[in-house]
Image: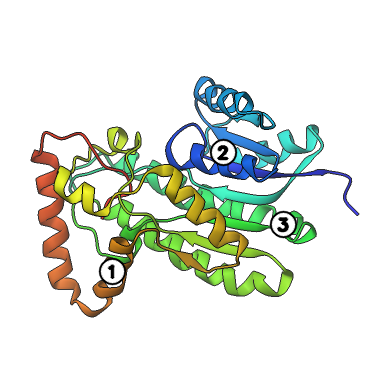
Amino acid sequence: MSTFRPIVLVTGGSSGIGAALARVFAENNHEVVLVARNGAQLDAVADDIGARGLKRPHVLPIDLMRLDSGARIGQELAARGLEPAFIVNNAGFGLVGGASVLDRAEQLDMIDLNIRALTDLSLRFVGSLQRHRGGLLNVASVAAFLPGPGMAVYYASKAYVLSFTEALHHELASKGVRVTALCPGPVPTGFQDRAGVVLSDRVSAFFSLPPEQVARAGYAALMAGQRVMVPGFANKLVTTFVRFIPHSILMRFADERQRKRKMSGTPWSQQPL
């Protein structure tokens, strides 16, 4: 029997969906640990949660793109007598532009964060998730269902997250571990600043959901043991109908969308379609 205290580990918890998920878990009486690079932003989120009369989350300012980040998280948690009952892999970023034009090192950083770090944390703590009959929530995107010219590496990384998470859902079910892929559409957060994405108000109004709504949908799906959650009726329609459309057509559509985003003057968007 473990003497370590169970916690919820939330990566990318300094803003947006990650911060919203941290609040939802805290509201449901979970002890939360926030991980991201920016310690000041993490402290701000932790202070906000504490100011709501909830238990203030622990803060771990760790760069998840470092190869030793998983080991460092494990060491920090053990030193505090903590271990994950739930893990939320939310950290990630995207870049708009042709893969052959964008900086190669930045695109490899994207793979490190969106894929390698997520895979590491998904597997590293399976034992403690099993002990606490907890779960794993991996944040993918509706982009996971589509080819992505103009954001090729980002779309491919989210396709990996969806496929990997669905497989883990099946593999870990017998161990009593819930595994869910959360696939939001556009969400108004700081993601767009890193990605260089802009999106028209008409499209955003149709597909967008606030981070809080996405977070509550993800939390409910995880607790219910749901394999995939696509929040929002419009996004559910997109992920259903793209299965019946040839990829050659989808790629032309996606390419045109990314070009318009780069040309538009409206600085908006999150997980891109």
Residue that extends furthest to the bottom in the rendered view of this protein: 244
Considering only vertical position in the picture, is 52 above or below 94?
Answer: above
Q: Position of residue 250 (x, y in %)?
A: 17, 67
Instruction: Please identify the quarter of the rendering in which residue 48 is found.
Output: top right
Number of on-image labels: 3
Q: Amino acid at mark 2?
A: Arg
Corner quadrant of residue 4: top right
Q: Residues within 10 Å of mark 2 (few under 14, many from 20)?
A: many
- Distance (Cα) linking label 3 and label 2: 20 Å
Residue 82 appears left or right of 38:
right
* SS under mark 3: helix
Q: Earlier in the sequence, mark 3 or mark 1?
A: 3
Q: Is residue 272 visible?
A: yes
Mark 3 touching mark 1, by CB under 8 A?
Answer: no
Position of 54 with respect to 19 (left or right) is: right
Residue at (31, 44) in percent of width and height: 270
Q: Which residue is mark 1?
A: 237
Give the mark nearer the N terminus: 1 vs 2.
2
Tell me the CA gap for discs 3 and 1: 33 Å
Label 3 sits on residue: 129
Please indicate whether residue 57 sits to the left or right of residue 103 in the image: right
Asked whether residue 12 is in view, the answer is no
Tell me the kind of residue under disc 1.
Answer: Leu
Q: Amino acid at mark 3?
A: Leu
The residue tagged 2 is 23
Residue 20 picture location, percent across and down: 49, 40
In the image, residue 211 sits, relative to residue 39, either above or below, namely: below
The C terminus is located in which quarter?
A: bottom left
**Residue lying at the far top of the rendered structure:** 40
